[in-house]
Amino acid sequence: MAVLIAATAASAALSTAQAVGPQVSEFTLDNGLKVLVIPDRRTPVVTHMVWYKVGSADEAPGKSGIAHFLEHLMFKGTEKTPPGMFSGEVARLGGQENAFTSYDYTAYYQRVAKEHLEKVMNFEADRMTGLKLTDEVVLPERDVVLEERRMRTDNDPGARLAESLQATTYVNHPYQHPIIGWEHEIKQLNREDALAFYRRFYAPNNAVLVVAGDVEPEAVRALAEKTFGQVPRADTPPRNRPQEPEPEAHRRVSLSDPRVAQPSVQRTYLVPSYRTATGREAEALDLAAQILGGGQTGRLYRELVVGQELAAGTGAWYQGTSYDATRFGVSAAPRPGVSLETLEKAMTGVVERFVAEGPDELELARAKTRLAADAIYARDNQATLARIYGAAWATGMSVKDVNEWPDRLKAVTADEVKEAAKRYLQLGRAVTGYLSAPEAPATPAKVETRENRS
Amino acid sequence: MRRSASVYWNGIFFGPRAVLPVLGRILLLVLMSLSLVSPAAAQSQTTRITRVVSPGGIEAWLVRDTTLPLIAMEFAFRGGAAQDPPATPGVASLTASLLDEGAGDLDAAAFQRKVADLAMEISFDANRDELRGSLRTLGENRDAAFDLLRLAVTAPRFDEEAVERIRAAQLASLRRRSTDPNSLASERWFALAFPDHAYGRPVDGTLASVPTITQADLQTFTRNTLARDTLKVAVVGDIGPEELGRELDRAFGALPAKATLRPVADVAPKGIGTVDVIPLNIPQSVVLMGTTGLERKDDDFIPAYVLNHILGGSAFSSRLFKEVREARGLAYSVYSYQVALEHVGLWFAGTATKNERAGDSIRIIGDEFRKILDEGPTQTELDEAKSYLTGSYALRFDTSSKIAGQLLQIQIDDLGIDYIDRRNALIEAVTLDDLRRAAHRLTEAAKALTVVVGRPAGLSGG
């Protein structure tokens, strides 16, 4: 997740001429709406995003999927704006739009030529509180979401295992539920659920407006006051989710499906996020993920793919942008004839050696160079920048945190990486998942019967 | 396996880094690197394109932009997987994956260490018609980055260790795709549509062909394909024309002057009007419908492009979106798109619907194709399409790599260096008559070759 945090002031970690990161302007309207303006004057376009500090982890028990379902329903019109009018106008303006939901946030965005900014701000401000829903639009959209779940999850054994892995990692925290929701609960969601969730969480004081592009901060302030500034503040509940206990036992999940033609082993550890970490633990975990899994120079690749020739591919990641305790993952896919048990043992060996020895100075420097460069590359894309700052804010970090990230990263020592690895990359904090095909040789993995009908 | 694959939600485990776990209202389609045409016309600095010709005679289009300390380059050699030996599909793809796996004095590990130390990005990928490359570097590492590129394109080693390792990765990927409904549908579609043509063979090879690819195959492909006369280059970033000229000669100067390509025939898709079902035990059927389209060089390409936008190209307001998703809730994802290959133009639609309703979705999509071909769009639809297509042009030029990608595609399509300035006028000029004429030429598209993967009710016979 380094890239998400990275963003800005990247120069600090690199040698020469790079000067500073984007000069992000930050202010708050009277109704509590936070505003961030990120300059990018290379093209006369703007990225306009509104992030709500509410995601699937804020759902009530039994209502999994409501945050995401509501996100879909937000396109169905308001008291003032008939269904389809907002999207139709964005299309006529040559704009692009979409929305997305995660565990900790829900965000809506449009990308338009800069002269159309006020128009989209008007519409977005209107649907902050004006949503109007009828069963006529709600019920078909629920079917759409069920199809989305089939497409993303049910149709894909790997995604089904990932869902179980996530559910098993968290024994108490609502991160255990999939963002899209459990199928049986999605089927029960209705118009009243959506509106109740909407009224509870959608308010200017629970949102951040991010505008990136060819704009002046003062002009954005004036437009924001004129549009979002008219939306009244509301009482939104504080974030107070059940937290994870200290994990005690290594757990295993396995999914066997005839459609798995390429098995894999995956492991996730429960670790702190940028918000919950102490000191530079989170930065150290970002570096650990890079050192273990960073392309072909990463330890997992060098040892499992190149050295021992057990794996066809490997990976490592750290999801640092998270409000509560988060996950660190490692994975590997075996070459033919290598069992998952053998591969898992070798993968564990790589992690344990890393924990015991820590990184050498060269690989630590290489990882820092890579992450710092990612921060510069991120600046080439205003939409990426908007996402970085928006996601950081929604998970409890400030603009300052983001801007100082390259400096903090640079300061991390080999000992700090080793300590973080030792503390968190322990089997007792982990869930290990096997994705495989059934043993029985009678069922070929690849179904190739063919019918041709005209 | 650093190929620039589509980004899937939760594609966590094999990516270099965690993918943001989010769900979008629509899936952002990443439509392969085929000529998915339609650049868009931008104002601003993107029109400041310089044609650079190096001292050694290598041409590149350059947009100099010193805002950020980086350089993005996109380039392509004509001759992709269509140049594979007919009995050995996958050679171009495996070659592309191996160019940065050891070159010159550097074995794979040493090469990759250098790439990492320079924090540069270099990748190669083969599609049906081209072998494409992409480079991103910080300005301060420019010389070293172009030097690594030189090694990759002029002196790849194809060491046995690297070949076997990348072959294993390629086979793992093929095994994964062998039960992935989208991959199965696409591969089957091309196999049925082009049974006796290079386009019918899978770009990344097969589980049978990849093990048989030899080092000699890779060397022959490299020698025949990577040459100066088929090279197109686009560069954006912090570099001047003269510096770029020197870097072009450094990187590509030692390549052979001429490529040796086997001829590829123009072709038309077969099997239009038939349905093929690949039974797979999944709850949702994946549908791919493909039919005749127009080639990029066709005079009616732009009208056909507008027609497609109205049918299924527009994200939230296309006819397919409204009929299949909004009104009936049959699918999350439904769309149509054009693919202009070098030797054929194609027109596709796709969706994914629970097995019980797959037949309904296919029927509705077919009806919408026929309706738009028979009756054409309304004036309002045409006006709104023009408004979107011209207005959104600038959004294609907002990052260095996107600009470079656009400039490269315009060169490949041979549209001229002034195309960006002309493009919006071409869209604006489209009339309902033009759409009718394009529709008339596409009457065959009232039928499609349909491939369904899943257990579609009433289609699979069980």
Image (spheres, coloured by chain):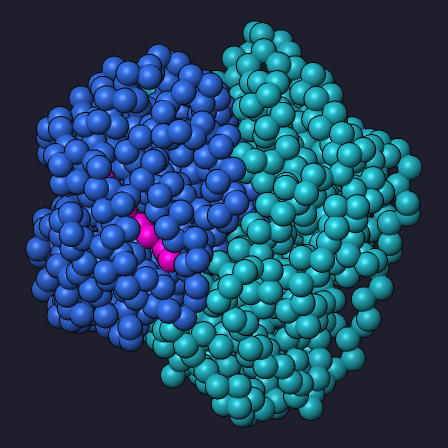
With B131 as the anchor, is A231 left or right in this view? right
* Residue A354 appears in the picture as rendered: yes
Q: From the rendered image, report the letter of the chain displayed in blue.
A: B
| Percent coordinates x, y for residue A164 in the rendering | 72, 36
| Percent coordinates x, y for residue A76 in the rendering | 52, 69
Q: Nearer the viewer, residue A415 or B339?
A: A415
Q: Nearer the viewer, residue B104 or B205?
A: B104
For residue B30, above or below residue B102: below
Q: Residue at x 22, y 37 (%)?
A: B254
Residue A451 is one of the magenta-drawn residues = no
Residue B75 is one of the magenta-drawn residues = yes
For residue B294, above or below residue A249: below
Q: Please state the extent of the stretch shown in magenta in the rendering.
A: B71-77
| Percent coordinates x, y for residue B85 in the rendering | 22, 19
Q: Colour of chain A?
A: cyan
With B112 as the anchor, is A198 left or right in this view? right
With B432 as the anchor, is B117 left or right in this view? right
